[in-house]
Amino acid sequence: MRVICAWCQREGRSWLLRIGEPIDDTSETHGICDRHQQAMFEMFPSRSFPSTRWLLIVSPGEPAAYSHLTTVMRGVEGVTVIVDRRSADRRRGGDRPAIERRQGDRRVRRPERSRLGYMLVRFGRFALDATPPNGDAA
């Protein structure tokens, strides 16, 4: 079975995501590629930062970058600058648990890394019950 990204297909891009079981089945089913999935996530506002459009996450080892970004972005509407609080895996000790309860990375959005010492996460500004940015009714 061929799994295709319907958005890529509509745009005329390469749209084959993978070939799955059963291999001898040549029919198509639809999925979504990483690029379009991230674009969809960017449309939704953040629950943690409701007035934020661009979240800049600075590494804790880059205090100069944090200081510079907070100074430069002060007063810019929709921009929030924070320091990444994650330092390491929260598990203590080197032993793995008998049963792994974690379901993988819980982050839905994947930050864009910058060479300037920060990561960028984009958020949309419309409510779920409002009209989407393209003007079509939901």
Image (cartoon, rainbow, N blue to C red):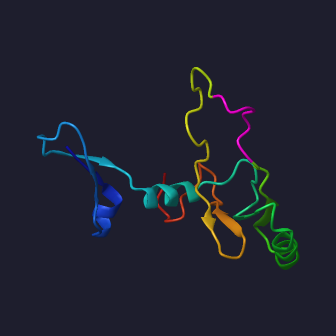
Residue drawn at the location 83% of the way across and 69% of the way down = 66
Q: Residue furthest bottom?
A: 72
Q: Is residue 80 above or below residue 33?
A: below
Decide if residue 6 is on the left or right side of residue 130.
left
Above or below, 135 against 3 in this view is: below
- Image position of 24 (left or right of 15): left
Residue furthest front in the image: 94
Q: Work out whether residue 19 or residue 98 is closer to the camera in this orientation and state it.
A: 98
Residue 20: say if magenta: no
Residue 22 in the image: x percent, y percent?
Answer: 18, 36
Q: Residue at x 63, y 57 (%)?
A: 126
* Residue at 55% over, 57% down: 131
Direction top: furthest residue: 98
Q: Quadrant of the N terminus?
A: top left
Report the front residue among 55 and 95.
Answer: 95
Q: Position of residue 86 (x, y in %)?
A: 75, 49
| Residue at image location 79% in from the left, 64% down from the top | 80
Q: Which residues are magenta?
A: 88-95
Prevailing secondary structure class for the magenta stretch in the rendered image: loop
Q: Residue 3: horizontal and vertical position, in percent?
A: 27, 48
Where residue 103 sits, quadrant-wise, is top right
Give the total number of marks visible in the rendering.
0
Quarter occupied by residue 106: top right
Q: Residue 135 at x, y = what percent? A: 50, 64
